[in-house]
Image (cartoon, grey):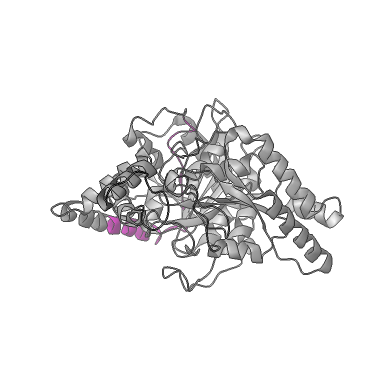
């Protein structure tokens, strides 16, 4: 596994080229085929891109991410490459354009190596729902890597790319980051353009980076953040220098500990690991205080009402008529819609479409969807109130470490509860980061989550970088 600093060192010393580094990553992808983290690999295209960046380095005109090799979750468009969304519905669909985030990575001279496996249409918490097979956890292939961006997290953990892009609708970057022992950042809603992202739930979806350390995640965020006129939800907010926030100093920071996140249901080993790092923050000059987020108990229900409603609306476009999968042997229009959608979508996607259609239906709209929007506002107000007294929050990322494949597949509610500590950030539109903070008795990574105020990624990156710098040897980083 390489951090970008090690790549820069080798490039500067002349002991490696972008082409040779890309070959290394291609070798790691081949070696890790059993993990099933990649849906497609752009070998020749990536090597050609690497040779171009080598020429730019020689001419002194290379961009800020020259030599960084990036993989992309297969729900984000890369021109002239498939964007399957992990689904039979789009298994042969080729993108006509680059997503804004891909354009910006290329402009920074990052090298795009391939597309990551994922839960179908980003719906899942284990990456078991892909039409291309489940992704396996490198630490124990019998366990899941989290989801829905499991392939993106595994690609970084297994050294298949320096960094990767995932998406986070209810925890789909932070939860797999915790399970795999890497750093994963969900930016503020509107901080990163969604143009070129195939939508799941449009008021929740965020694109963000995975990396081996905070610095690499900050570098990628620097490249992809900022207003985009092609995304109507993109924010007109200046982009700060994220690397400048990595001071390794937390003196004077006010850090809140939400009591509701440390209640029943949290594994003892995760609680103990977090308490150790909270003590470390206190010992280094941070002010720690308990806060309350009283509507936490409603987050999962609220999220799965609102997100499924948006999914039902967004996925209506996949009807067998315009693009994507079309069933064979159909007799009329109604049969084409029914068969194409029945055969093209997997069980979890169908479940969420049906849930979303139900909560939007006549007679149930007020009872579910409208009420869900009102509770979402209460959850947002909980965070606004907490952030009047603290600069950021420390919470667990997940209630447990990585679970066995198949363990929760038959119980959707238990699967949904895997995201109990992450969905609130999407409901509130705030940034969050998960960092590895130790391991459990099975050697499985434990994740610590830092939540911040809207557009205050610098503070959560600052705390993340500090904790990373003080981890004891062997603690998971």
Which image quadrant for residue 390?
Answer: bottom left
* x and y, in percent, of residue 199 in the image: 41, 57
Nearest the viewer among 477 and 132 is 132
From the viewer's side, name the closer residue of 215 and 386.
215
In terms of depth relative to the viewer, which is nearer, 54 or 77? 77
**Tag count:** 0
- Residue 410 sits inside the magenta stretch: no
Taking 74 as reference, is 409 above or below it? above
Q: Is residue 242 visible?
A: no
Left or right, 247 with respect to 331, comes to right
Work out which quarter of the rendered image holds the N terminus and state it: top right
In reply to whether residue 377 is colored magenta, the answer given is: yes
- Whether residue 180 is visible here, answered yes or no, is yes
**Magenta stretch?**
376-403
Q: Position of residue 63 (x, y in %)?
A: 71, 66
Q: Is residue 195 above or below residue 164?
A: below
Residue at the location (42% across, 70% down)? 232
Q: Residue furthest left?
A: 363
Residue 98, position as x, y percentages in the image: 56, 63
Position of 158 with respect to 459 (left or right) is: right
User: What's the residue at 83%, 57% (across, down)?
Assistant: 12
Q: Is 310 situated left or right of 17 in this image?
A: left
Q: Residue furthest right?
A: 14
What is the quadrant of the C terminus in the image? top right
Question: Residue 474: x percent and y percent?
Answer: 65, 34
């Amino acid at each position: 596994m390489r951090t970008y600093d090690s790549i820069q060192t080798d490039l500067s010393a002349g002991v490696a080229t972008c082409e040779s580094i890309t070959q290394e990553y291609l070798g790691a992808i081949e070696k890790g085929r059993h993990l099933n983290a990649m849906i497609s690999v752009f070998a020749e295209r990536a090597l050609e891109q690497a040779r171009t960046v080598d020429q730019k380095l020689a001419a002194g005109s290379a961009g800020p991410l020259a030599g960084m090799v990036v993989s992309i979750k297969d729900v984000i468009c890369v021109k002239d490459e498939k964007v399957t969304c992990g689904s039979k519905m789009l298994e042969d669909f080729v993108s006509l354009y680059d997503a804004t985030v891909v354009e910006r990575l290329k402009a920074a001279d990052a090298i795009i190596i391939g597309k990551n496996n994922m839960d179908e249409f980003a719906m899942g918490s284990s990456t078991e729902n892909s039409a291309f097979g489940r992704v396996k956890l490198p630490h124990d292939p019998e366990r899941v890597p989290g989801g829905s961006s499991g392939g993106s997290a595994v690609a970084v953990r297994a050294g298949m790319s320096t960094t990767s892009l995932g998406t986070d609708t209810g925890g789909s970057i932070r939860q797999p980051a915790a399970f795999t022992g890497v750093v994963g950042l969900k930016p503020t809603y509107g901080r990163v353009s969604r143009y070129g992202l195939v939508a799941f739930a449009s008021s929740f979806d965020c694109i963000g980076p995975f990396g081996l350390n905070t610095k690499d995640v900050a570098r990628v965020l620097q490249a992809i953040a900022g207003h985009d006129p092609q995304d109507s939800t993109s924010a007109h907010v200046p982009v700060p220098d994220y690397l400048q926030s990595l001071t390794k100093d937390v003196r004077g920071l006010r850090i809140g500990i939400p009591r509701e996140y440390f209640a029943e249901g949290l594994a003892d080993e995760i609680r103990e690991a977090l308490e150790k790092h909270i003590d470390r923050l206190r010992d280094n000059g941070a002010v720690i205080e308990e806060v309350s987020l009283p509507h936490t108990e409603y987050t999962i229900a609220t999220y799965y009402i609102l997100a499924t409603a948006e999914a039902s609306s967004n996925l209506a476009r996949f009807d067998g008529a315009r693009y994507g999968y079309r069933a064979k042997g159909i007799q009329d229009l109604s049969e084409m819609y029914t068969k194409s959608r029945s055969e093209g979508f997997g069980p979890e996607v169908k479940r969420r479409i049906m849930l979303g259609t139900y909560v939007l239906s006549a007679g149930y709209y007020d009872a579910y969807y409208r009420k869900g929007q009102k509770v979402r506002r209460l959850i947002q107000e909980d965070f606004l109130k907490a952030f009047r007294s603290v600069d950021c929050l420390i919470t667990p990322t997940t209630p447990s470490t990585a679970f066995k494949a198949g363990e929760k597949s038959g119980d959707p509610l238990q699967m949904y509860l895997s995201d109990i500590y992450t969905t609130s950030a999407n409901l509130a539109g705030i940034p969050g980061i998960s960092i590895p903070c130790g391991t459990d008795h099975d050697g499985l990574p434990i994740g610590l989550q830092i939540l911040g105020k809207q557009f205050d990624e610098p503070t959560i990156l600052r705390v993340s970088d500090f904790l990373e710098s003080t981890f004891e040897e062997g603690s998971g980083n």
